[in-house]
Image (cartoon, rainbow, N blue to C red):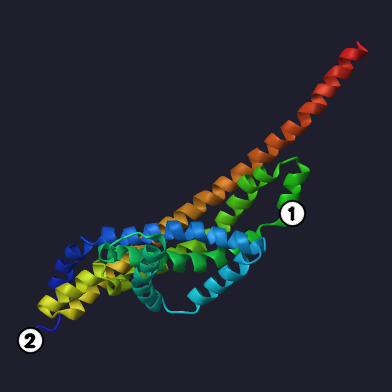
Amino acid sequence: MPKLIDFKMILTNIPQLLQYLPITLAIVILSMIVGLVFALIIALVRLNKIPVLTQLFTLLVSFVRGTPLLVQLYLSYYGVPIALKYWNYYNHTNYNINNLPAFLFVFVAFAINEAAYNSENIRGVLLSVDRGEIEAAQSLGMTGGQILRRITIPEALVVALPTLGNQFISLIKGTSLAFVAGVIEMTAEGQIIAGRNFRYFEVYLSLAIIYWALTVITEVIIRFVEKRLNKFRTVQKVVEINDTLEDNALPIKRSLQVLETETK
């Protein structure tokens, strides 16, 4: 009976596939950072109901959330060169479309996808910040900037972290589609290896183990950061309230000292 599963090959495949892990992580980290920046912009625009931009961003979010990521990758792969052709025509430039790296198409697609999904998360989180805490901070004399920096953003970050973590994990798994745009990452390298030795099951099982390990590591890091952030916020709230009370009490102390001096 022939050897149906080569367990040794499963282990030997992993180091070969891990050579392309930096490319996978580069896609994930860059797309997440840029996507979060645009997500915050979209969320703030929609919360403040800025005319025209609100409608455009609402349409963009609806389109991205309503179409498969694979289709978005193809749209980026074929759409970015078309956009560059228009740019060359109207701006009299001569950028070479053939020199565009495949990484760019993947980055654009994933960044827009992350921006659309995370904008909804961020918008919901900002709306969930307790109004009572904001009003209490205002009554203690905090400025708008202080409230945003010390209360709104930290509170929103604590609430948003689990959702952002899940989105980060989804992005890690989503990078397995990057090969359709010509990027050689772990999944693409797995297909190349399987095409050489025809041991498809072993190769894809090796890939599954790697993605599973990345997911578990990410979950552990997120839980650790979440616990630390909750502890930090508790301590920070106590310190801020004490500092604010002391700052507000200082003029009263000075007035009492002046009255005491005048009385003497």
Above or below, 90 against 150 in this view is below
Where residue 128 sits in the image (x, y, percent)?
65, 61
**Separation (CA) of disc 1 from disc 2:** 70 Å
- Please identify the residue farthest to the bottom as the structure is shown: 1
Mark 2 is surrounded, within 10 Å at the Cα level, by few (under 14), some (14 to 19) or many (20 or more) other residues, namely few
**According to the image, label 2 marks what residue?**
2
Q: What element does badge 1 sit on?
A: helix
Q: Residue at position x 32%, y 73% from top?
A: 177
Above or below, 62 against 45 in this view is below
Q: Quadrant of the N terminus?
A: bottom left
Residue 71's tag is none
Would you say 192 lies left or right of 51 here? left
**According to the image, label 1 marks what residue?**
132
Q: Nearer the viewer, residue 25 or 242?
A: 25
Would you say 157 lies left or right of 88 here? right
Q: Residue at position x 18%, y 80% from top?
A: 200
Q: Residue at position x 31%, y 60% from top?
A: 94
Number of the front mark, 1 or 2: 1
- Please identify the residue farthest to the right as the structure is shown: 263
